[in-house]
Amino acid sequence: MAKLMVAGAGSWGTALAVLMAEAGRETVLWCRDKERALQMATARENARYLGGVAFPEALSVTSVASDLKDAEGLLFVVPAQAARGWLERFREATSGADLPVALCCKGLERGSMAPMHKVLSETWPEAKGSVLSGPSFAADVARGLPTAVTLASEDEAQRSFWLERLSTPTFRPYASDDPLGAELGGAVKNVLAIACGIAVGKGFGESAKAALIARGFAELQRFGLAMGAKPETLAGLSGLGDLVLTCNSPQSRNFSLGMAIGEGADPATYLESQKSVAEGAATAGPLTEQARALGCEMPISEGVAAVIDGRQGVDEAIGGLMNRPLRSEA
Ligand SMILES: NC(=O)C1=CN([C@@H]2O[C@H](COP(=O)(O)OP(=O)(O)OC[C@H]3O[C@@H](n4cnc5c(N)ncnc54)[C@H](OP(=O)(O)O)[C@@H]3O)[C@@H](O)[C@H]2O)C=CC1
Ligand SMILES: O=C(CO)COP(=O)(O)O
């Protein structure tokens, strides 16, 4: 089997690269910073984002985008807001090759409101896009803990390509033909995890959190269906599965962001202090903008967007949610 490239040397890209290499697949991890790539290649670990996880022998590191020319597939793990520029660079580096690309980032692009597979088709139309999403903390996957995710593509050949390469004794991808649904679940759950974190940070207790997860899932479904996703995808690993994971653990950066806000932190100041990405913060705006355009009610996500953008304080946003007109649950 030829080698795979993983682009993006944050915690998730590194965990996926380690997973692939541990299973004996020749893997190259691309990092945008030349010096950091050299450091990782020498130290045989990514101390900045995934310290303590040794790089297997089959893993090499590069900062050269054109190394993708020697790869049979790309796992793209760059944060959503930076995806467009890097996809353009990778297309250029491969002269527009029709390469399998699995999109692993979870967010909507600010401005265009586009999901990542749309950004891929606009920037690199020859690429064969798939989506890898689902409940999977990088640290769990890198430690070899059992994990199940969704691998979605409309193209059967692409599903087979990735299922064969991604499955390991501890990592189980399930096939789906609904990349849009798989992507939207991952993008929306990040926004909802911020809301759950806020509730926990405020000390609201488990009942409030359960209510937010259930009403949040109603929002996720409403939005997903309005966008054209399949209901079974939204109720699967990449939707409900990832929502439950992310809304219940401080291991989640989105949940932790919410907790800090609930405890009184200023969102912008907190975000500036973090090296890790909390995708929900940037996705809340485009998500709610798109929802409004579709006439789709998302009051929890609206509250998160207002708090993140500084339009509302936390107490005002919570008051807004609790005082909405009474309605049916459906
Ligand atoms: N961590 C996880 O458990 C999971 C994460 N994901 C998704 O994976 C994606 C990547 O997140 P993750 O690996 O966690 O990231 P981390 O928070 O661990 O690290 C941030 C990464 O983003 C990079 N980055 C920041 N700004 C830019 C930019 N402008 N251009 C290119 N790269 C940039 C950083 O590079 P640098 O160090 O050079 O700044 C670094 O590699 C996200 O969409 C996330 O939602 C999905 C599933 C699980
Ligand atoms: O997507 C994730 C787990 O599936 C990781 O969530 P966070 O980005 O909130 O850490």
Image: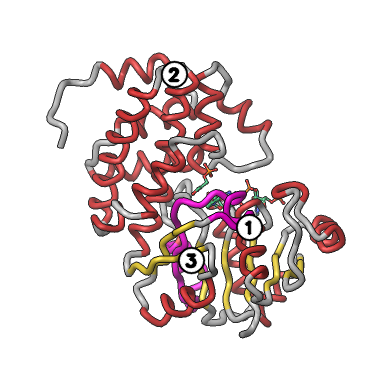
Task: Name the residue beneath numbered marker 1.
Answer: 15
Instruction: Pinpoint residue 20: horizontal percent, then vertical percent.
Output: 62, 69
User: How far apart are labels 2 and 1 at the CA level?
Assistant: 34 Å
Residue drawn at x 55%, y 40% is 278
Above or below for 80 versus 208: below
Task: Name the residue beneath numbered marker 3.
Answer: 120
| Quadrant of the rendered image containing residue 286 | top left
For ligand 1, tell me if the residue under mark 1 lies within 8 Å. Answer: yes
Q: Residues within 10 Å of mark 1 (few under 14, many from 20)?
A: many
Q: Residues within 10 Å of mark 2 (few under 14, many from 20)?
A: many
From the image, which quarter does the C terminus lie in? Answer: top left
CB within 8 Å, label 2 to label 3: no
Give the mark toward the camera: 2 or 1: 1
User: How far apart are labels 2 and 3 at the CA level?
Assistant: 35 Å
Task: Name the residue beneath numbered marker 2.
Answer: 314
Going by the numbered disc 3, the residue's amino acid type is: Leu
Badge 2 or badge 3: first in the primary sequence: 3
Q: Is residue 134 covered in magenta?
A: yes
Badge 2 or badge 1: first in the primary sequence: 1
Q: Residue furthest bottom?
A: 1
Going by the numbered disc 2, the residue's amino acid type is: Val
Give the mark toward the camera: 3 or 1: 1
Q: Is residue 235 covered in magenta?
A: no
Residue drawn at x 60%, y 54% is 12
Q: Nearer the viewer, residue 151 or 279?
A: 151
